Amino acid sequence: AQKVTQAQTEISVVEKEDVTLDCVYETRDTTYYLFWYKQPPSGELVFLIRRNSFDEQNEISGRYSWNFQKSTSSFNFTITASQVVDSAVYFCALPFSGGYNKLIFGAGTRLAVHP
Amino acid sequence: KAGVTQTPRYLIKTRGQQVTLSCSPISGHRSVSWYQQTPGQGLQFLFEYFSETQRNKGNFPGRFSGRQFSNSRSEMNVSTLELGDSALYLCASSLGRSLDFYNEQFFGPGTRLTVL
């Protein structure tokens, strides 16, 4: 079965701290993509990254970085020097097998960054 | 480029009524997916439309239906509303090219439906 687990329900940090959000997935597919989305209080899901299972290189985009480890089926997301604007719920997602745009989402991690 | 728009943003209905939600995708996007978000069940896939055809369906009762028009705009309908249908309904659009299964999806702001 395909599954996405985000074990951290809520994380609270003080501004400028680094924070890592965990994502563990299960899939029988040999080729797959993984996604991270951010949901600020406004409710709209904001696309952050799409990663192909072929590419295990870490990716960095500004203060955001992602660590993809196929051996442990994990796709973790790190925010460096967190800011109050990073406060949101973050979702990791995996497409259903052959499911085109049908995504399985994790339960989400609520990040609160305090000044 | 304009983003995904959803109307209305908020809706209050009573049990037994029906409701129609609308989604306009990003220009050029042909795939529209619908998701239901509730505190208990999280984000769950409802269905996806591509070129006016339903391409994927989630595990929801037949009271939930949708359609897509030739301009890619989509509507979803919920009949005989139940209290448990109270949720944020999110629409997502993507290019939906058939050879590229995993396009990034861009989400709208959602419609918050409250059933009393």
Image (cartoon, coloured by chain):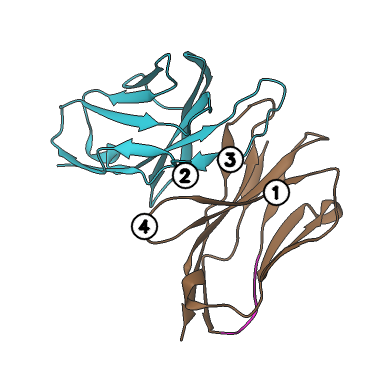
Chain colours: A brown, B cyan
Amino acid at dot 2: Leu
> Looking at the rendered structure, which numbered label has been put on residue A25?
1
- In the rendered structure, are the residues bearing label 3 and label 2 in contact, judged by CB atoms less than 8 Å apart? no
Gap in Å between the C-alphas at discs 3 and 2? 8 Å
Query: In this orientation, which residue lies closer to the viewer: A94 or A88?
Result: A88
* Quadrant for the N terminus of chain A in the image: top right
Gap in Å between the C-alphas at discs 1 and 2? 16 Å
Amino acid at dot 1: Tyr
Gap in Å between the C-alphas at discs 1 and 3? 10 Å
Secondary structure of residue under mark 1: strand
The 10 Å Cα crowd at callout 3, few under 14, some 14 to 19, many 20 or more, is: many
Q: What stretch is highlighted in magenta?
A: A16-21
Identify the residue at horizontal 22%, vertical 30% (top origin).
Answer: B81
Name the subunit of mark 2.
Answer: B
- In the rendered structure, are the residues bearing label 1 and label 2 in contact, judged by CB atoms less than 8 Å apart? no
Identify the residue at horizontal 47%, vertical 77% (top origin).
Answer: A84
Identify the residue at horizontal 37%, vertical 31% (top origin).
Answer: B23
Q: Do labels 3 and 4 share a chain?
A: yes
Location of residue B18 with respect to A86 vertically, above or below:
above
Whole-percent x, y for residue A81 in the image: 63, 80
